[in-house]
């Protein structure tokens, strides 16, 4: 039985759709956690695009970039959640509209 290859364009379209959904999530949401998740969605869209172009060009540079993006995403999630917990302890709310000043 022969394996069916998914066309390159499908990966690029999927990546674009995920990027748009993530961007809309960052713009529309007022909750910091939802904004953080939307940022993760955009980073994963970039990962899909890197892997798709990596398959198309037969190069491993895209996979190296994906590794670095995963590392940055993990650090962003850890630091972001730590900041969100600190803000929630101080303000008892994580609504972006109410968090307009940097003072404690």
Image: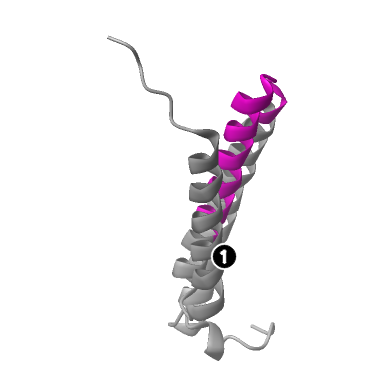
Start and end of the magenta stretch?
39-62
Q: Residue at x 56, y 77 (%)?
A: 27
Image coordinates for residue 36, horizontal then vertical, percent: 52, 63
Please state if 4 lies on the left or on the right of 11 as rendered.
left
Residue positioned most to the top = 1
Q: Picture coordinates of residue 91 (x, y %)?
A: 50, 84
| Quarter of image, res 67 | top right
Residue 22 is left or right of residue 103, and the answer is left
Give the camera-side residue of 100 and 7.
Answer: 7
Q: Residue at x 69, y 33 (%)?
A: 65
- At x 58%, y 50%, the residue is 43
The answer to whether residue 55 is magenta is yes
Q: Position of residue 23 (x, y in %)?
A: 56, 67
Q: What residue appears at the point 43 percent right and 24 percent down from the top-left corner?
A: 5
Q: Does the magenta portion include 75?
A: no
Q: Which residue is mark 1?
A: 83
Q: At numbered mark 1, what does the secondary structure look like: helix, strand or loop?
A: helix
* On screen, residue 66 above or below 36: above
- Where in the figure is residue 14, as x and y percent of width and height? 48, 48
Quick one: 32 or 53, which is closer to the camera?
53
Image quarter hosting the N terminus? top left
Residue 49 appears in view: yes
**Principal secondary structure, stretch drawn in magenta:** helix
């Amino acid at each position: 039985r022969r394996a069916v290859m998914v066309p390159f364009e499908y990966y690029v379209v999927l990546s674009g759709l995920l990027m748009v959904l993530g961007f809309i999530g960052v713009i529309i949401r007022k909750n910091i956690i939802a904004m953080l998740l939307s940022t993760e969605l955009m980073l994963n869209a970039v990962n899909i695009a890197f892997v798709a172009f990596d398959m198309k060009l037969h190069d491993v540079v895209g996979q190296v970039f994906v590794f670095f993006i995963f590392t940055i995403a993990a650090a962003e999630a850890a630091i972001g959640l730590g900041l969100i917990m600190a803000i929630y302890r101080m303000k008892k709310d994580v609504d972006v509209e109410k968090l307009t000043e940097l003072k404690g």
